[in-house]
Amino acid sequence: MTQEIVNTVTGPISVNDLGVTLMHEHLLIGYPGWEANTLQPGPSRDEIIATCVGKIEDMQAHGIRSMLDPCPNDLGRDVTLAAEVADRTGFNIICATGLYKEDEGGVPHWHFLRSLGRGVETMAELFIHELTRGIGETGIKAGIIKVATGEGRITDYEYEVLEAAALAAVETGAPVTTHTDQGTMGEEQQQFLIDKGVPPHRIIIGHSCGSANHDYHLNILDRGSYLGFDRFGLEVLAPDEQRIESLIALLKKNREQGIVVSHDGVWCTRGEPFPAELLAAMDADVLFNPTHFHRNIIPRLLEAGISQAQIDTMLVDNPRRFFSGEPPTPL
């Protein structure tokens, strides 16, 4: 089943109006418990909005028209802030419902509910409400479900979140995007969601560029899901040279119809900021810069013989097809 619209934080739009779309950027995150540290409240709302508006204006200057902010419910999500940024810039921002991985998410609340006999079904009910009726009292509807797993294994809690996401996706038709650590567990995520009834082309296996394993990438593509090559610039986790080499290898096999791109930038944080020494050790022109792919990666792809049409497929056609529910065109 295909659909003509996608929910953004300022209301539904035609999928044909998405244009050039980055599929994994964060306006703001806050690790659970940030509010307990009153010595580090973080930037003010006005400062956050100013930073986000400035980033988006830079993106618009490069022809980018839309982005997915897949911040889950328990990682500092603020959809009214996102709506204000979108209003000020005329930019399309799609937000998510969902929950983060066990080691960095808001797990205690859900463990408490489970002790009361309320688990997967309660999570699914939340996701469905936020997709179909709105987030809290805001009236803003999520356009996607976000799930996450840690490195090398999927915990029992994470399987519960995956199951709840599958229930919500099957009932609503919403797509799912995932977080993986170090390019691991993507195949397991994909198989679990498919087994629970989620169509493969409604799944993005995020951060797949954390792995340089070509077979890993092909296995996910061959099962019909999308690869997120969505951490360009995060050299602290994997070098861009590895990401570029892996991406070119796939594009040389004409697999562009199964790939979406982004940076996983974190533009602002609630509470304690990222350590200054960490940021100083990285290239500020690259790290968390949402124009990095356009300025620095696209020229490298073109030099390697990748066509502009292939690049446009990843940036324009694939986000449109993914959100419309249109299966990839067969090779």
Image (cartoon, helix red, strand yellow):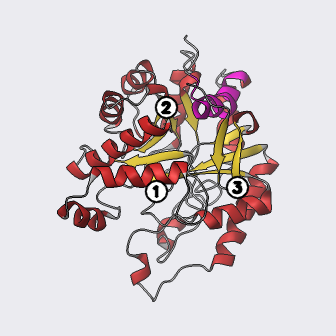
Which residue was labeled with disc 3? 10
Give how far across and how far down residue 204 sits, in percent. 48, 35
Q: Residue at x 48, y 44 (%)?
A: 239
The percent position of residue 256, horizontal first and vertical second, equals: 58, 23
Q: Nearer the viewer, residue 119 or 144?
A: 119
Query: As shown in the figure, which amino acid type bears the numbered disc 2?
Result: Arg
Identity, as a three-letter code, of the amino acid under mark 1:
Pro
**Quadrant of the image for the C terminus?**
top right
The answer to whether the residues at label 3 and label 1 have Cβ atoms under 8 Å apart is no
Q: Would residue 324 be counted in the magenta stretch? A: yes
Q: Quadrant of the N terminus?
A: top right
Asked if one can make out residue 231 in the rendered structure from this viewpoint, the answer is no
Q: Is residue 132 left or right of residue 217?
A: right
Q: Position of residue 258 (x, y in %)?
A: 53, 25
> Which residue sits at x=23%, y=44%?
153
- Which image quadrant is residue 294 in? top right
Of badges 3 and 1, the one in the foreground is 3
Q: Marks 1 and 2, how far apart in space?
A: 18 Å
Circle 1 SS class: loop
Q: Which residues are magenta?
A: 309-326
Badge 2 is on which residue? 202
Location of residue 193 with respect to 59 vertically, above or below: above
Which residue is at the front of the view, 128 or 75?
128
Identity, as a three-letter code, of the amino acid under mark 3: Thr
Q: What is the magenta segment's predominant secondary structure?
A: helix
Per the image, label 3 sits on a secondary structure element best described as loop
Q: Earlier in the sequence, mark 2 or mark 3?
A: 3
Outermost residue to the top: 331
